[in-house]
Structures are given as C-alpha cells and as structure tokens.
Image (tube, helix red, strand yellow):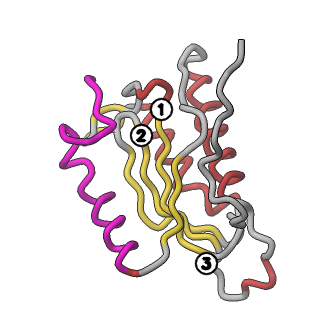
Amino acid sequence: MNLPTRKSPRLKGYDYSNENYYYVTLCTHAKKCIFGAADQLNAFGKIARQELVDIPSHFNGIQIDKFVIMPNHIHAIIIVGCVDDIEKVKPFPTLSLIIGLYKSGVTKKIHDINPETEVWQKSFYDEVIRCEQGYRKIWEYIDGNPLLWQLDEYHASL
C-alpha cells in the first residue's frame, strides 16, 4: 500500500530553537473532546493544563505566555529565549522537542488513569509570530476561544 508522502508543517530551513514567540495548536486524537467542557476542565484537562504550566521548569529560557485548554485542542503562545543572559542557556530546545515532551508527559499521566485513551493527533500547528499586531491578534483569539466554542472550527459534539 502506497501512502502519500506527508508534507512537513514546519517552515523549511527555519531553526525552531531561535529566540521568538510561537503560536501553537495541538489537537486531540480524532478531535475527540477529552479535556472536559470549554469552561470546566475534567481530570484530563487539568493534567494538560498543569503539564503546560510546568514546561518552563523543564527548559531554561522557555516561557508559556498565553494559553487555553479547549475540549479537544490547546492553543498556546510559547516564548523561546526569554532570559536575561541568553548566552548562558543557549542552545534553546526546538519547538518540536518542547511539544513532543509535553505531549509525552500528558499522555503518560492520562494513561496512568485510563491506558485506552488515545490522546493526541500527530504533529501540531505552529506559527512564528512576526510582529506586535500578529501577537495581539493571536492573544485575543486565545482569550476569546472559550466564548466562541460553538463556532470554533475544531468544535465537536461533547
């Protein structure tokens, strides 16, 4: 069986360990609503939130700026290179490494509760935030996402 070649969602030739602000979206497997309601996280959603908040404790120079945990996806702004003395902590981890370890940590803890749960869709969406206007637009989108859940492109029946 010949499967189509999967196109990389990453920017060709871009170094994702560069100091920058990155907007990421991670979706659950088959976009199933496993994190609870948009306004109230269940146990799996609380795990996803805690693991996200803990990312800076695993990596020097990484910060989670803004995020929201939705029933079947997560939006976050991740800052790479947010330290006073950057040269002391370089090189920074790549965005793929950060997300990979995050997904792995969430999956392990969810599997401790229910080993049958399929947690993540492959890969993730990212966008390099290039300007203040783009940053503000993404910040507002993340902030308003729970209010727009019924209209969200990732919405699925709970």
* Stretch in magenta: 133-158
| Magenta span includes 85 | no
Q: In this image, 87 relative to 144: left or right?
A: right
Residue at which label 1 appears:
28
Indicate the amino acid at tag 2.
His
User: Overall secondary structure of the magenta stretch?
Assistant: helix
Q: Between tags 3 and 2, which lies in front?
A: 2
| Magenta span includes 152 | yes
Residue at position x 67%, y 44% in the image? 100
Indicate the amino acid at tag 1.
Thr
Q: Secondary structure at mark 2?
A: strand
Badge 1 crowding class, 10 Å Cα cut-off, few under 14, some 14 to 19, many 20 or more, is some
- In the rendered structure, find residue 73 and report the number of the disc placed on it: 2
Q: Where is residue 25 drawn, in percent x and y?
A: 47, 49
Q: Secondary structure at mark 1?
A: loop
Q: Quadrant of the C terminus?
A: top left
Which sits earlier in the primary sequence, circle 2 or circle 1? Answer: 1
Task: Look at the picture and state if 16 lies above or below 147.
Answer: below
Residue at which label 3 appears:
82
**Distance in Å between CA atoms under marks 2 and 1:** 6 Å
